[in-house]
Image (tube, rainbow, N blue to C red):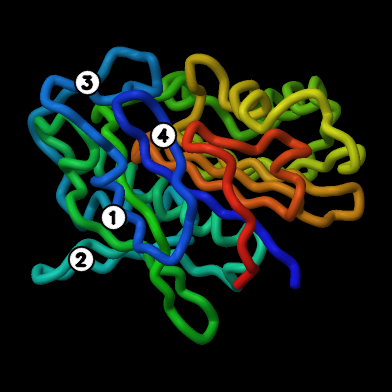
Amino acid sequence: MISTGLVIGAASAVGVVSAANDDDRYDPSARQQVQPGDVPMNYSGAPLRRRGASIPQDDAIESVVAGLGKRVSFTDRPDGPLEVHVTTPSLEGPNDVRTTWTAELALGALAELRRTNETSYAEVLGDTKIKADLPLETLDLDGGHGFVATGQVFAAQADRRSDEAIESSLTDQARKFGLEVIAVDVLRPLGPAPIVILRTRGADKAPGWTMDNLRDALAGSPLDYEGIYIELRAPDGTPLVAAGTSYRTGVGGLWFEPGHDETFGATHLGGRPQPEPAR
């Protein structure tokens, strides 16, 4: 049986961490470990923008859905948690990470539009659920919110960077790692959040860099994007590793084919994920 690894984690006051995705329900509050006096993470590195009035919920949802190309929808019931739905053909391979990442982008953008005087996005969102709408069923996915500061504006959002400029920058950075860009799709929940599909020259040897190195280079410093999804594929097109990070919610997900976590140094601060059977 083919096995894969999948990890997901939420940000605390010390950064993005990960936890193994096992049979226990993911509990972000148990992993945040936020103490009184802690300062929410400011991933953008820019001064925070404050305001005293939020955008109405329906208008905020309409804006986020449009920015994500109608990949998502929301269910907002008075007697239950806010649900974000992402339509996906399957949750096999890297699709699980990409689906969850898209949902987290939507939640982070919605929280930014809806905030008033809250200091963290988790305060704005409260309890939420992520749903994957498959062709024949709807499934719950793990997710959560880290202790991340509201009012963040990322560099590519601030300078209104075009899709063409983003693709050019990502291509230049990828070449430094010996990677070929197969496709770039720029989502705009608020600011840009690119999907980057890359082809490796081979997958038998460690390339001399890690996924963290690659993500840092592609995402920029300070961060250009409010989220980034990176997928590495073998020369024949087989997916090897996928990593998605949503900086407004402070959540990162990782998937890998067996052994390729070691090949590409695909680990997180929470420790090396353990492979588990594919769904």
Q: Secondary structure at mark 1?
A: helix
Which mark is in front, 4 or 3? Answer: 3
Alpha carbon separation for disc pair 4 and 3: 15 Å
Q: Secondary structure at mark 3?
A: loop
Type of amino acid at the residue the image marks with label 2: Asp
| Mark pair 2, 3: CA separation | 30 Å
| Vertical order, 30 against 78 (above or below) | above
Q: Quadrant of the N terminus?
A: bottom right
Q: Residues within 10 Å of mark 3 (few under 14, many from 20)?
A: some
Write down the quadrant of residue 218 in the picture. Answer: top right
- Who's the residue at 57% across and 26% down the image? 219
Marks 2 and 1, how far apart at CA: 10 Å
Q: Nearer the viewer, mark 2 or mark 1?
A: 2
Location of residue 76 in the rendering, given as x and y in whole percent from the top left corner: 20, 66
| Of residues 34 and 127, the one drawn nearer to the viewer in this rendering | 34
Q: Residues within 10 Å of mark 2 (few under 14, many from 20)?
A: some
Q: On the image, numbered disc 2 is attached to which residue?
A: 76
Q: Earlier in the sequence, mark 2 or mark 4?
A: 2
Q: Circle 3 sits on which residue?
A: 39
In the drawing, does residue 26 fall left or right of residue 136? Answer: left
Which residue matches tag 4?
Answer: 247
Q: Mark 2 and mark 1 in contact? Answer it, CB < 8 Å.
A: yes
